[in-house]
Image: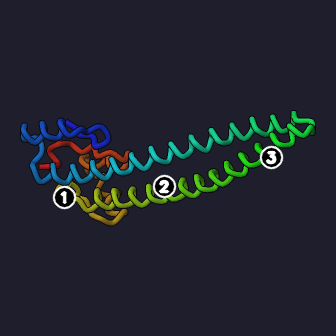
Amino acid sequence: MRIYLSTLTDSQLAAFVHEGTIKPAVEEELRKTMSKKFEIFNVEQETKSREQESELIDKDQARLRENMKALRGSPEEKALLQRYTRELDAQEDRLAGLRKEISDLKAKRAELQAELDTMVMQSALMRRCKIAFSVRQRINYARKSRCPRSLFQSPVLGHDARCWR
């Protein structure tokens, strides 16, 4: 049996503990890891939201520019042109803010991912599977052993359950 962290839910985790598939100590570590993955998911959603807002502003700016091209120069149109210019200026300010927020969120996501990677590497799951911590030793161990191989093939923890006991 394989347990994948990417699709593991709280209720599944509780069922695995109840059935004795994994021990409570492993459950605690998995919950911490799942919590960190949830933080990463939230940051990704915030980033996506900011990027969508940026795309909407870009589309609106294209519309405003087209409208500005169509204006001929009458006094009423000059007032409209000034209004469009103010809108474009405000949108440019918002775009600059969004770019900064997106950049900050991407940095935060990278930081959270590094924390998650560290948690996985230092977890008791790794120690129970007796994986050495140096990259070369881990790769050599993975070549010889069936247990942690999936760790090197994907970011999910696809260990056999017996490795977690």
Given the image, on which type of amino acid does mark 2 rest?
Answer: Leu
**In terms of secondary structure, where does tag 1 sit?**
helix
Residue located at (23% from left, 59% from top): 123
Mark 3–mark 2 Cα distance, whole angstroms, equals 34 Å
User: In the rendering, at what x and y percent does residue 131 appear?
Assistant: 25, 59
Q: Residue 42, relative to residue 120: is it above or below?
A: above
N-terminal label among 3 and 2: 3
Q: Quadrant of the N terminus?
A: top left
Q: Left or right of 94: which side holds 23?
A: left
Amino acid bearing label 1: Ala
Element under disc 2:
helix
Q: As drawn, is 34 to the left or to the right of 165?
A: right
Tell me: 84 left or right of 116. right
Q: CA distance from mark 1 to mark 2?
A: 30 Å
Instruction: Point out residue 114 in the picture as x, y percentages from the top left corner.
Output: 39, 60
Q: Marks 3 and 1, how far apart in space?
A: 64 Å
Q: Are the residues flagged by discs 3 and 1 in contact, CB closer than 8 Å?
A: no
The residue lying at 19 percent from left, 60 percent from top is 127
Mark 1 or 2 closer to N-term?
Answer: 2
Going from N to C along the chain, the mark reached first, 3 or 1, is: 3
Position of residue 22 relative to residue 105, above or below, is above
Identify the residue under disc 2: 105
User: Which residue, given by chain and number where applicable, does mark 3 sit on?
Assistant: 82
Mark 1 sits on what residue? 124
